[in-house]
């Protein structure tokens, strides 16, 4: 049983790569739309995984909320987390341990997987060549992690002093960064509503045929900005956008290619 949150598709891909053929995979963005969460029923001895990206060396706000609320009919015997990131996972492991402990659950193992950095608000997206190299390396890493999960490894992320210092600096900024007032659309927007339908937290509504961002919901997952007509402040104009190849294939096949 795997629970994931994804913005531009990296963590979605990781979750499906780690899953066994008959394993249940849940997108927590869909689960959190309901007024209350159901109690989940893992099989005896079944592993339970949480997969999400790293934002500002921290867990996405929705994943934090989910970890505190999720409940099971029986306590899972093995719980793991996988964090996808462009750099360091910071103190996400410790944060996940703490949140799950509040919920009387124990994190048994954790890994970080380096994937393509996507926060176009702060930096340019890597070249296609660099993206392919990163994703190929991630595939090998995910295959190894899948084997370790099968063996119920107690693997933990080694947290360096650099990661700790960077988290102390960056994590508090996340709450300030998840503002929506800087999102805007350029004159190429045709009012198709794709950005609104893609948004995993329903932070966008269509008003008079064009997107409008709601305050208090945004995760800064960069799902909406995959559309070239969406910009953020003055920093994103002219920069390339990133979408994991899985979602590009879905779009090419005629799917709306929602993040979830």
Image (spheres, grey):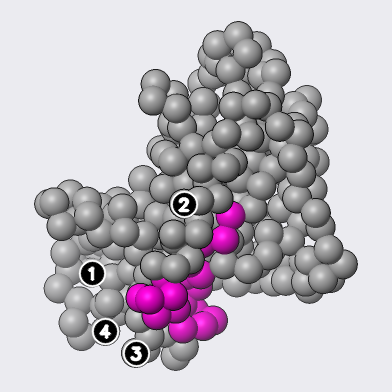
Find residue 210 and name its label: 1
Label 4, label 2: how far apart the Cα atoms are: 36 Å
Identify the image quadrant of the C terminus: top left
* Secondary structure of residue under mark 4: loop
Q: Is residue 129 left or right of residue 61?
A: left
What residue lies at 79% left-to-right and 48% top-to-bottom?
94
Q: Nearer the viewer, residue 146 or 106?
A: 146
The residues tagged by marks 1 and 3 sit, at their Cα atoms, a distance apart of 21 Å
Which residue reaches farthest right? Answer: 161
Q: Tell me residue 107's x, y (percent).
A: 74, 34
Residue 205 position within the rendered picture, expressed as x and y whole percent measured from the top left: 31, 59
Q: In the displayed structure, would residue 164 be above or below residue 69? A: below
Badge 1 marks a residue whose secondary structure is strand
Height in image: 177 above or below 2? below
The residue located at (50%, 51%) in the rendering is 140
The answer, for residue 10, to whether it is visible in the render is yes
Above/below status of 180 relative to 52: below
- Nearest-to-viewer mark from 4 and 1: 4
Q: Position of residue 198 (x, y in %)?
A: 31, 55
Which residue is at the far top?
44
Please name which of the two marks, 4 or 2, marks the residue nearer to the observer.
2
Q: Where does the magenta region start and end? A: 113-131
Residue 105 sits in quarter: top right
Q: Does 232 appear in magenta?
A: no
Q: Label 3, on which residue?
A: 238
Query: Which residue carries the number 2 mark?
Result: 139
Whether tag 4 and tag 3 are in contact, CB under 8 A, the answer is no
Q: Which residue is mark 4?
A: 186
- Residue at position x 48%, y 66% in the image: 134
Left/right placement of residue 210 relative to residue 239 reads: left
* Separation (CA) of disc 3 from disc 2: 30 Å
- The numbered mark, 2 or 1, whose residue comes first in the sequence reads 2
């Amino acid at each position: 049983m795997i629970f994931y949150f994804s913005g531009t598709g990296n963590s979605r891909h990781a979750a499906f790569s780690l899953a066994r053929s008959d394993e249940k995979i849940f997108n927590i963005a869909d689960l959190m739309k309901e007024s209350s969460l159901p109690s989940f029923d893992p099989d005896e001895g079944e592993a339970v995984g949480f997969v999400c990206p790293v934002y500002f060396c921290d867990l996405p706000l929705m994943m934090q909320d989910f970890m505190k609320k999720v409940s099971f009919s029986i306590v899972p015997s093995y719980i793991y987390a996988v964090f996808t990131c462009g750099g360091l996972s910071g103190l996400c492991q410790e944060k996940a341990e703490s949140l799950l402990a509040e919920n009387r659950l124990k994190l048994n193992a954790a890994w970080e997987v380096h994937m393509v950095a996507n926060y176009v608000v702060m930096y340019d997206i890597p070249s296609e060549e660099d993206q392919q190299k990163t994703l190929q390396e991630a595939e090998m890493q995910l295959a190894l992690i899948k084997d370790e999960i099968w063996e119920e490894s107690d693997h933990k992320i080694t947290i360096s002093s650099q990661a700790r210092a960077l988290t102390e600096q960056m994590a508090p900024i996340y709450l300030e960064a998840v503002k929506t007032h800087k999102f805007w659309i350029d004159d190429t927007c045709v009012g198709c509503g794709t950005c609104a339908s893609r948004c995993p937290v329903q932070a966008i509504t269509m008003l008079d045929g064009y997107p409008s961002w709601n305050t208090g919901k945004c995760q800064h997952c960069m799902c909406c900005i995959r559309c070239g007509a969406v910009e953020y402040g003055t920093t994103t104009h002219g920069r390339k956008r990133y979408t994991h190849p899985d979602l590009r294939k879905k779009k090419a096949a005629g799917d709306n290619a929602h993040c979830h």
